[in-house]
Amino acid sequence: MAGLCVGEAALVTAGRRGRRWPQPLLRSAALWTLKHVPHYSRQHLVVSRSLCSAAYDSNEKTFDKILVANRGEIACRVIKTCKKMGIKTVAIHSDVDASSVHVKMADEAVCVGPAPTSKSYLNMDAIMEAIKKTGAQAVHPGYGFLSENKEFAKCLAAEDVIFIGPDTHAIQAMGDKIESKLLAKNAKVNTIPGFDGVVKDADEAVRIAREIGYPVMIKASAGGGGKGMRIAWDDEETRDGFRFSSQEAASSFGDDRLLIEKFIDNPRHIEVQVLGDKHGNALWLNERECSIQRRNQKVVEEAPSLFLDSETRRAMGEQAVALAKAVNYSSAGTVEFLVDSKKNFYFLEMNTRLQVEHPVTECITGLDLVQEMIRVAKGYPLRHKQADIPINGWAVECRVYAEDPYKSFGLPSIGRLSQYQEPLHLPGVRVDSGIQPGSDISIYYDPMISKLITYGSDRREALKRMEDALDNYVIRGVTHNIALLREVIINSRFVKGDINTKFLSDVYPDGFKGHQLTENERNQLLAIASSLFVASQLRAHHFQEHENSRVPVVKPQVANWELSVKLHDEVYTVVASNSGPTFSCLSREAGGNMSIQFLGTVYKVHILTKLAAELNKFMLEKAAEDTSSILRSPMPGMVVAVSVKPGDLVAEGQEICVIEAMKMQNSMTAGKTGKVKSVHCKAGDTVGEGDLLVELE
């Protein structure tokens, strides 16, 4: 066993009875210390600082009242700008969202149905009734839900209510990937080879895929946000991809049509923000690098892209504007491209709405895109010319999700936020969120907690600020992906800009395992664990001293604390001293188990006194469960289909059931060949993480 002496930076002294240890843990030089995070009001908690220099003219009249047809962080984001513009707001919500932050921020709120999105946030009749009831003059749809639904825009127009977005022609043309691709070709925009019609069934999908040549991308015609998208490398994957993509598309967009195109291997995903008005003007507002993805959904974005030169940037921008003008586009929108290693770029799709990652564009241009959308919807011309659009500094955005990054880079987690503090005390930090301490993350909606944005004079400063912000973000009550985000932004390949859409699978071929400690970092973690253990022991003795116990309390000799710390199946002997700054941990159990968040990753350590460690050798260990014979749900969700029954013979890797979690469908497969002993679920059941689904003999 290795020996380690924990010196002056190692140990907290005991606090008073009932003391709550402050969060989070920060590093200063070679020492570890705790700093208090200041308290923020609810409004600051959810809307944060904008990090943009947009001007708000109170004399420029737009709308008196806007209904925000969305929820969560984007609803809060829209309400924030409306308040700055002097516009009253109406929030809509499902019954489970009645106490949500966006509801509290708005001037009025209307319930539009129960939790399922089809009965609430996609319920056009209920939303139209809310508009009539409140007298809202305009609707901002945010993103997702009805933001790209042409029927919703038509319903609004029929009632003389303004849709804050493009007109129905542009929504239909660009929202349909098949039609948009044809329009892009006609507008002389580079396009990806593929099939330009609707794929009828799985057999036709296989035939088309063979003609194009593998690999191919199967995706929803009316989709976006990674929903309804699958990569297929052979006929079997094409058939599975057709089935899952069509089901996801129907669930998320109410439209199960699919298209197939050539999959460009190892590309970058770079998109161009465009802005158009009703007077024929259109601008491109630079690009965003969105290549860090998992399951076709973006994880980390930045603006500008380190990869593009000014010539390529201009060419992409001009093609994006040409496409926008081809459909008389009037609002904020995004043209997405795939870019190969030689800087050849190909049109992917156009999103006729505000993008999740719009804050990084706001940071480097100084524009408020929500404000611009509202102005355009009212009929004002754009205030800027192309030459006026700058690239000032660098911005990075990390999508903070309630997900377990150790499972397929992020399977959903649900729960209640017992603690929540955003790192807004740091410079150059913006947090767009729609939650607060006590908020619930449920299976019904997207698992995003927030968008964490940092800004700096250059990329190096923006990334360093992101590292600090992630280290200072306090989230308790749900599993989150901060460990993955932190590892990505400090990875040497990412820092050099050597990235593509396969970055996560290339860097972590065996899955994400968390931060790999150096020897010095390991010693620091052992010091932290030891100091926390001793602090808890001292506090326990302090408690006993104040309870007037009849049993004499023997005070421990602090100088003689000899500890045994188990970390990653290795046991270390630690000697602790009794001076230095304080530390904190996520959880502590009486048996010596601790969870400590260190360098973004949560480490589980087992710490005992030397005597207790010697006696622990004689304790029996619980036998590990044979996971090859059982199938447990890796995430909370709803069972969509069950493919087996008791008595069936199954092969290793064969599909057992399908679980839908937060709008994504996941195929659960057998871990070995065998006979089905029992089935513990059926289609329509709601299951939790770890619930038993199927047993094999």
Image (cartoon, helix red, strand yellow):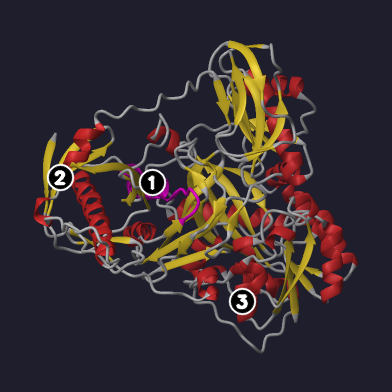
Q: Which residue is the site of mark 2?
A: 574
State the image quarter where residue 14 is shown.
Answer: bottom left
Q: Is residue 240 left or right of residue 545?
A: right
Is any atom of residue 396 visible in this view? no
* Contact between labelled residues 1 and 3, with CB atoms less than 8 Å apart: no
538 left or right of 132 in image: left
Query: Which residue does the image show at 41% across and 30% down from the upper left?
Result: 509
- Residue 643: percent from the left, percent from the top? 71, 21
Left or right relative to 153: residue 446: left
Mark before the other along the chain sequence, 3 or 1: 3
Q: Tell me the tag on residue 488.
A: 1
Closer to the camera, 539 or 341? 539
Q: Residue type at mark 2?
A: Val
The mark lying in front, picked from 3 and 1, is 1
Q: Which one is earlier in the sequence, the residue at label 1 or at label 2?
A: 1
Question: Residue visible at 39% across and 69% down?
Answer: 428
Q: Residues within 10 Å of mark 3 (few under 14, many from 20)?
A: few
| Residue ID at (47%, 62%) | 420
The residue carrying pointer 2 sits among few (fewer than 14), some (14 to 19) or many (20 or more) residues within 10 Å by Cα, namely many
First along the sequence among labels 3 and 2: 3
- Secondary structure that dominates the magenta span: helix
